[in-house]
Amino acid sequence: MIEIDKVSKWYGDFQVLADCSTQVARGDVVVVCGPSGSGKSTLIKTVNGLEPVQQGAIRVDGITVTDRRTDLPKLRAKIGMVFQNFELFPHLSVRENLTLAQIKVLGRAKGEALERGLRYLDRVGLLAHQDKFPSQLSGGQQQRVAIARALAMDPVAMLFDEPTSALDPEMIGEVLDVMVKLAQEGMTMMVVTHEMGFARKVADRIVFMDHGRIVEDTPTEAFFSAPRSERAREFLAKII
Ligand code: ADP
Ligand code: MG
């Protein structure tokens, strides 16, 4: 479903991604981890074309993201993305947040968009909050709305960039529970996270990055029981 093929990217003289290759098969969950500044956010943003690359190719569901002729807004409508800081529209109610892109980007009728939006809002346990504004919700609730909003677009894959790292500890679990359920239902997911309990539970593979390189791309159990690189061993020792 997602193929990253020998991707390199520079900011001026600084190489942020160096010859990165990995794949996410349909229905698989890949967790990306590594030290701060190693290029995780940049890598995940290349998948929906939010970050252009100078070398290599990226394909999602048969569409070449890195082809200049690709209609990126159309492609992005098929890929759900959830960020660290929720990114809900602050001036819109939960209902409006859920329906706006469905109506504007997919051209759905208002009633249909609302019906789908509320179905996903129910799935994340927040149906009762549909008339509230983001500022009236906790961080964990806002992030669950952001996930419901992405799912209402019928994405072929979901990208998550540290979805729980801005949350108070007591709210992390409610967001991870939603993500675990999604993974178990067969969603194709690429998740940047340091929540290693989540990774162990649902990831098929772990990608470990350091200094813009994919240092390891290993089945989950092998990564935790015997990471191959010294750098990954050090990293795990620090965060577990
Ligand atoms: P991570 O998500 O692993 O913490 P990032 O992908 O955000 O890492 O960043 C990787 C490196 O690229 C960091 O050193 C960061 O400072 C640098 N970087 C990120 N965005 C830019 C930018 N727009 N211009 C220059 N350097 C950047
Ligand atoms: Mg990051």
Image (tube, rainbow, N blue to C red):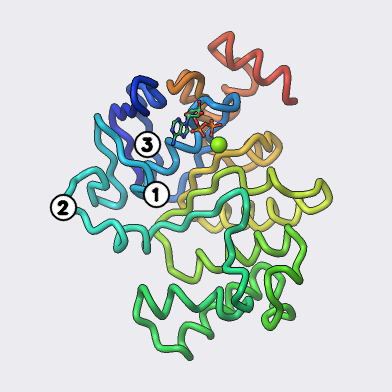
Query: Residue drawn 58% across and 12% down?
Result: 231
Distance Cα–Cα, label 3 vs label 2: 22 Å
Q: Residue 107: x and y, percent?
A: 34, 81
Residue ID for mark 1:
26
Q: What residue type is labelled 2?
A: Arg
Give the secondary structure at mark 1: loop
Q: Place residue 199 in its image quadrant.
A: top right
Within-10-Å neighbours for mark 2: few <14, some 14–19, many 20+:
few
Q: Which mark is residue 139?
A: none
Q: Residue 124: x and y, percent?
A: 66, 67
Within-10-Å neighbours for mark 1: few <14, some 14–19, many 20+:
some
Q: In this view, does 123 lie to the left or right of 64?
A: right
Q: Which mark is residue 23?
A: 3
Q: In this view, does 226 lie to the left or right of 52?
A: right
Q: Please state the total of marks drawn on the protein image.
A: 3
Q: Earlier in the sequence, mark 3 or mark 2?
A: 3
Q: Which amino acid does label 3 sit on?
A: Gln
Residue furthest bottom in the image? 111
Q: Residue 203: x and y, percent?
A: 56, 39
Q: In this view, does 92 lie above or below 40?
A: below
* Image quarter in which the C terminus is found: top right
Q: Which mark is residue 69?
A: 2
Q: Do the residues labelled 2 and 1 touch (CB within 8 Å)?
A: no
Q: Residue 21: x and y, percent?
A: 35, 28
Query: Residue drawn 59% across and 65% down?
Result: 88
| Mark in front: 3 vs 2 | 2
Seen from the viewer's position, the closer of residues 181 and 79 is 79
Cβ of mark 1 under 8 Å from ligand 1: the answer is no
Residue furthest top in the image? 230
Q: What residue type is labelled 1?
A: Arg
Q: Is residue 47 left or right of residue 200?
A: left
